Amino acid sequence: GGGASSVVVSAAAAASRRLPVGVRKPPLRVVVTGGAGFVGSHLVDELLARGDSVIVVDNFFTGRKENVARHLADPRFELIRHDVVEPILLEVDQIYHLACPASPVHYKFNPIKTIISFPLQTLLHIFYKTNVMGTLNMLGLAKRVGARFLLTSTSEVYGDPLEHPQKESYWGHVNPIGVRSCYDEGKRTAETLTMDYHRGAGVEVRIARIFNTYGPRMCLDDGRVVSNFVAQTLRKQPMTVYGDGKQTRSFQYVSDLVDGLITLMESEHIGPFNLGNPGEFTMLELAQVVKETIDPSARVEFKPNTADDPHMRKPDISKAKSLLHWEPKISLKQGLPRMVSDFQKRIMDEKR
Ligand code: NAD
Ligand code: UDP
Ligand code: UDP
């Protein structure tokens, strides 16, 4: 029969297949595009902690070097300033593709100062280009080196949904010519390209549809509702509620998302999978939680809402629960204080 060495090899191979996520060997070489951003930097922390080598590719459009600064001296970590719209050559095992500017729609309506001062049209262009050309390049890279590719898509692919809660089988209700279409359609196209590279070129792919996520390191002024309400309350400004505040969202704490992304990447399932916390809140209820967490004297002020704003959003996560055995663990009331202490520090630093 086979020599001793082949027995050893196959036994080792079988054992490595049985090893749970996190202790698998050998360490992987992983690229995280958008790894200097909010979600990406938390993902990088986790991948390095489990022993992988990580390359972050980021153009710092909405991300910050500070988010990954603690890893700069780590020999398993590398930071490359690069725009994914341009091709790049790397040799890796896995690609987490998160690069994508924060939703530009907000800049038009965001009453607080914004970090970026491009005209809206430029932003939409950058946005669409990143999603389409950036995703194409990362899929081309995955194809060339045989890497597994994970796309971070979004609940926005469901548009203003007519089905509630949203299941992965729902095709969505998106206005193709509306003010937020660049974001929705950009991500829908990214999903399409991902499935085409899978079917046409045999690339191993994974698709996550992420629902509203919050936590430490979020941009202070990117206009998303949780960061707005928290920053406003800490600055003793009223929380800006758009419209009547009865629209709903479901808020997921970032560590639950990172756990879901890694579980999906390591699984045998392509997806798409909804990754979100099914706990649903109106914007007025969210304001109430922020008030209770930070300052009982906090106030709200009403502002006109943006066009095409989804009325309600809540993930149906039964698919991820049954196939990935994943579900979020941290409620809004548990997660919010962890974000508040990070925001408090950063807002104090601003004042210095
Ligand atoms: P973020 O803005 O903090 O991170 C995005 C990162 O991508 C930033 O570091 C930015 O500099 C980088 N980037 C943008 N364009 C780039 C380009 N052309 N080349 C290289 N890097 C580029 O946003 P986030 O919240 O961390 O989002 C990460 C991903 O998750 C995105 O794809 C986003 O669409 C998706 N998502 C997030 C949420 C959420 O609630 N946070 C919800 C749904 C989907
Ligand atoms: N690409 C890349 N890095 C690679 C391989 C490809 O950035 O390691 C880019 C490539 O420049 C192209 C895209 O990915 O723009 C799609 O590549 P693919 O080989 O699928 O298509 P083609 O080059 O044949 O158009
Ligand atoms: N929103 C709000 N006040 C703000 C920012 C947002 O009331 O200061 C509302 C917004 O109109 C939307 C909801 O909060 O109904 C979620 O907005 P966000 O931009 O955070 O995420 P998305 O619309 O992408 O779900």
Image (cartoon, grey):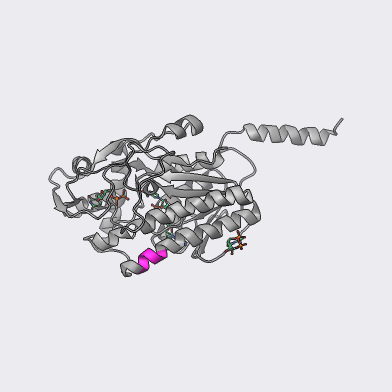
Q: Residue at x 73, y 32 (%)?
A: 11
Residue 333 as seen in the image, left or right of residue 238: right
The residue depicted at 56 percent of the width and 55 percent of the height is 139
Instruction: Work out whether residue 78 can be spotted.
Output: no
Give the percent coordinates (x, y) of residue 143.
62, 54
Quadrant the N terminus occupies: top right
**In the rendered image, the vertical position of residue 298 relative to residue 318, given as above or below:** below
Q: Nearer the viewer, residue 221 or 305?
A: 305
Q: Which residues are magenta?
A: 122-126
Q: Main secondary structure of the magenta part?
A: helix
Could you tell me residue 352's position as x and y percent? 26, 63
Residue 37 picture location, percent across and down: 41, 55
Left or right, 132 with respect to 245, comes to right
* Residue at 24% across, 60% down: 109
Q: Is residue 33 above or below residue 249?
A: below
Magenta span contains residue 67 = no
**Which of the 4 quarters of the picture holds residue 165?**
top left
Q: Is residue 168 left or right of residue 243?
A: right
Please state the horizontal and vertical placement of residue 53, each as a whole percent of the image. 58, 51
Report the side of 38 relative to 294 (left or right): right
Residue 245 appears in view: yes
Q: How many numbered marks, from 0 up? A: 0
Q: Indicate the quadrant where residue 168 lies.
A: top left
Viewer-closest of 78 and 274: 274
